Image: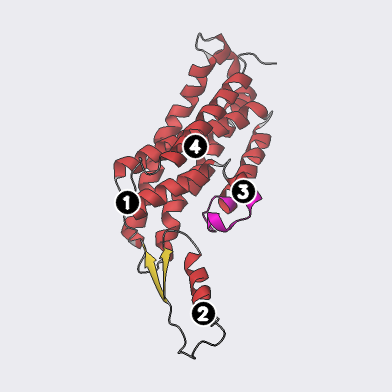
């Protein structure tokens, strides 16, 4: 008997090994036979290296930590330093002001993505099966979504300390529920429902699909669409909450 394991997902190989070691029940009256042999074949990661599973998803984890933190204190920092008064007097709209806050960090996020993938390729030999263009398009949408989440937090918090605390609150569920450490399908239904609200869940599916399984953006259109919806929703909420006044 053969068990096919998706090697791009964490912990699945251990579960397959456990299933392979379980005794198989025989029908009543059947002839005694030898112990059935299970062959476990790991696809997309035949060497069964942990780095292949972790490094691509680590891109999303690091981007989540940095991007959300960068922008969560953006508006609050301007208010505390007194720079918000100057921004209020400018003719730019709320959307233009928030977009200007986000754009520099988009470039930083793409540089981070390049560095992590490069280090993973050079030091750990992590393959890149799919298209780099598809991967960077998915990364760009995810970076924008994470920055929009940080902006929304920045419009709620009153101080930078509050903003950083709220940003950290979003990080732990993202790491635990996004499929970074545990298989997404193996989690309880309530955990899966919460994970669907986190952008890292959908980016992990995209980057593992493109980098390890050779999927295209057409194959990943569902998680990509969810990221776009999250981006539009968070940015719209941030823009609606932001007022060009000090009160």
Q: Quadrant of the N terminus?
A: bottom left
Q: How many numbered discs? A: 4
Tell me the quarter of the picture where residue 164 sits.
top right
The residue at which mark 1 appears reads as: 214
- Indicate which label's residue lies in the foreground, 4 or 3: 4
User: Mark 2 or 3, which is nearer the eye?
Assistant: 2
| Way the structure is coloured | secondary structure
Residue picked out by circle 3: 173
Q: Residues within 10 Å of mark 1 (few under 14, many from 20)?
A: some
**Disc 4 or 1, which lies upstream in sequence?**
1
Q: Position of residue 9 (x, y in %)?
A: 46, 59
Q: Which residue is mark 4?
A: 226
Q: Residue at x 30, y 44 (%)?
A: 132
N-terminal of the pair, mark 2 or mark 1, is: 2
Nearer mark to the viewer, of 2 and 4: 2
Q: Nearer the viewer, residue 82 or 19?
A: 19
Q: Which of the marked residues, 2 or 3, is nearer the chain's N terminus?
A: 2
Q: Is residue 159 magenta?
A: no
Q: Position of residue 42 (x, y in %)?
A: 39, 67
Question: Alpha-carbon distance for marks 2 and 3?
Answer: 33 Å
Q: Nearer the viewer, residue 83 or 179?
A: 179
Q: Which residue is mark 2?
A: 21
Q: Secondary structure at mark 4?
A: helix
């Amino acid at each position: 008997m053969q068990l096919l394991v998706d090697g791009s997902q964490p912990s699945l190989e251990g579960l397959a090994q456990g299933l392979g070691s379980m005794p198989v029940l025989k029908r009543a009256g059947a002839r005694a036979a030898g112990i059935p042999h299970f062959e476990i074949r790991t696809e997309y990661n035949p060497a069964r290296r942990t780095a292949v599973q972790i490094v691509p998803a680590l891109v999303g984890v690091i981007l989540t930590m940095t991007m959300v933190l960068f922008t969560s204190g953006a508006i609050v920092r301007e208010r505390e330093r007194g720079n918000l008064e100057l921004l209020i007097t400018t003719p730019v709209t709320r959307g233009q002001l928030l977009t200007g806050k986000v754009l520099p960090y988009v470039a930083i996020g793409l540089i981070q993505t390049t560095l992590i993938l490069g280090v993973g390729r050079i030091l750990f030999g992590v393959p890149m099966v799919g298209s780099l263009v598809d991967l960077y398009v998915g990364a760009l949408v995810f970076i924008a979504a994470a920055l929009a989440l940080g902006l929304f937090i920045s419009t709620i918090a009153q101080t930078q300390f509050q903003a950083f605390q709220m940003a950290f609150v979003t990080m732990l569920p993202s790491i635990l529920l996004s499929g970074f450490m545990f298989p997404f399908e193996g989690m309880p239904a309530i955990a899966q429902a919460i994970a669907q609200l986190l952008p890292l869940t959908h980016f992990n599916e995209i980057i593992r699909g493109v980098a390890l399984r050779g999927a295209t953006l057409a194959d990943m259109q569902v998680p990509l669409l969810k990221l776009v919806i999250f981006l539009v929703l968070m940015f719209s909420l941030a823009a609606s909450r932001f007022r060009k006044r000090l009160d």
